[in-house]
Image: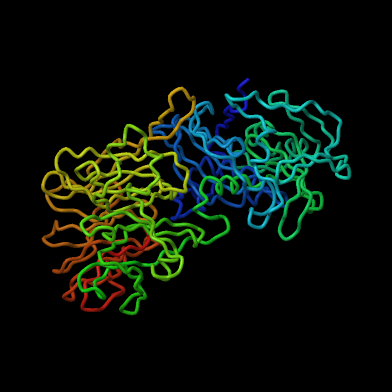
Amino acid sequence: MRTVHRVIAILVLVAAMLTNTTFLSAAPFANRNAFADPRFAAIWTRTDSEAVRGGRTWYWGPEPWFDSAEIYTDSPQTLRTVQYFDKARMEINNPADGIVTNGLLVVEMVSGRLQTRDTFLFDYRYSCANTPVAGNPRSANPVAPGYCQFTSRATFDDNFREPYRDPIRLKERISTTIDMNGNLGERPDLARPETTIVQYSSITGHNIPKIFWDFMNQRGKVVENGRVVTAPIVDWLFTMGYPITDPYWVRAVVGDTERDVLVQLFERRVLTYTPNNPAGYQVEMGNVGQHYFQWRYPHLGMPWAAPDPVTPLIYASTIDTGSHWELYRATFNGSGQRLTYNPAETVAYSWLRSWDPAQQMLAIDSRRKQPEYRQVYLMNNVAVEQGETAANATATQMSYIDGHDFSLIPPWQYDEFQSKLVNEFNPTVSPDGTKLLVVSERMGKPNITVWPIPQTTHLLFPSRLTNNVSNCRYESPSWSPNGRSIYWVSDCDGNFEIFSADLLYRPRYSKGIPFVTGFRAELTNIRNLTNNAANDRFARVSPDGTQIAFASDRDGNWEIYVMNADGSNVRRLTDHSATDDAPTWSPDGRQLAFASDRDGDFEIYILNVSDGVITQQVTQNTAQDRWPLWAQ
């Protein structure tokens, strides 16, 4: 009986929202604590706003902290809007139907599958989560079992085994324990009256104790239609789904103390009971949103517990070589800290931004392997902080040559991504840190391609996005902050124009195996945003996704411009007879760094986006300082 993956949904009326709530599209690094959709805000407001919460535990968490567009084949253009909270994730699969769903995150972590469509039958296989089901993160919680330890005792659809079910245990008290190795035991001293089994789910075959059943059906203050009323706090089927395990006692480190915690896994949530917690917090929703995020995006750190990533201003200079570009970190005193030391050029293009500073990386292209070819690399945080001559500094090659993981390349793309040296440049990391846009000549002519980044969830096969049949020149690919669209510059007809397009992902299946092996990407809804006889180059999307900065010679020489992301409202920011080009946004989106030869050689400057006023000259020397990178 395939009922575990049943879609539980709720129709959210905008009228249910508080009238003074502000709604913004919360791009991961623009305004991550804003609600990505008013329907998300309505659900959160109902249970967790200060108007109703008082001293009770959170049902979602204090605020959202990450949103994105994740691959989902049953959504329009195969992407759905998701937003993460401490306790769960909200999703909108189809914006037109007004329905918000509450993801089956626990099923995914226990089964080791990423749900990429309405049924789990065709899901991408990954690995189960070792994240502790209760207490601190694994680094500070070595004793608690992870989701993997419940896999053999959990109910979820699986073509390779019968669904697991527990026997009915009504009126029994819970004394069974499970440890970090998945071994069961007995602790009769934990068999408390409140752990007495009072319900049995015939749907999934699991028992529910009184302490959890009372919490699931609790009444209290909630916001409905803009008013505070007393009602059931949650629809437990929508919020939690059915139980997929029986309850078990675990040992877990909570704060700085190891404690006994009763846990039970449901499709969407984990319930925990900690007897020595204060009243109102003894039964809580587990931090499933945090757990899932650590499992799916381990390279992004913990945004709920960390400030936004800081990215320094990087630029290329010939100051020490006299001939080729090396990378420097701006020190804002007229010079910079040298980062690279190679016999051939290196230019920075984007950041893999992470809330864990140790996992932040710099995407570059460099001729270090063979001078005639530009290749793509990721420099680790040590190299960015101290320079690549420091101990433990690395620059890992991403281009598909010897040593790359060719298992990620499907057979039908072997010819395109065979092991060979070609020019590949302008690597741009996706907002979720799992993909790279790259201009590649691997197919003979330059094309925009998208690649998976190793050590992330490999949903994506390397994919060619453009089909260059006109000897086009491509450059400057860039992501929208929500990952739904890309922007780039191309010259196919004698001048450079700025384009945008939406991404579409198509699943690929293994022959004879009923689940997705990965996705290939393609472009849809391609738009020319500039469409004039001048050259428009070096396009960069603002951190909030609303504007594009670029350089253009439309007024007779190269100047810095900004326009709306749809190509409207073009404004010129510089007005000088020299060349001004290569703009890059500051993290807050209020300033641009750019290169200019207005003092006789190229230097790096900073200007205000609001009025075009230059506020600082970052470099001041007789060398060439170019290609700045700040927040992208």
Q: In which quarter of the image is the N terminus?
A: top right
Q: Would you say 565 lies left or right of 89 here?
A: left
Residue toward you, 588 or 389: 389
Residue 98 location (% of width, % of height): 49, 33
Q: Can residue 36 be seen in this view?
A: yes
Q: In which quarter of the image is residue 517?
A: top left
Q: Is residue 594 above or below residue 2?
A: below
Q: Would you say 257 lies left or right of 345 here?
A: right
Residue at the image position 59 percent from the left and 25 percent from the top: 160
Residue at the image position 21 percent from the left and 75 percent from the top: 623
Residue 525 location (% of width, % of height): 29, 36
Q: Is residue 384 above or below residue 168?
A: below
Residue 258 location (% of width, % of height): 76, 55
Q: Can residue 610 be seen in this view?
A: no
Q: In which quarter of the image is the C terminus?
A: bottom left
Residue at the image position 60 percent from the left and 47 percent from the top: 291
Q: Is residue 5 above or below residue 290?
A: above
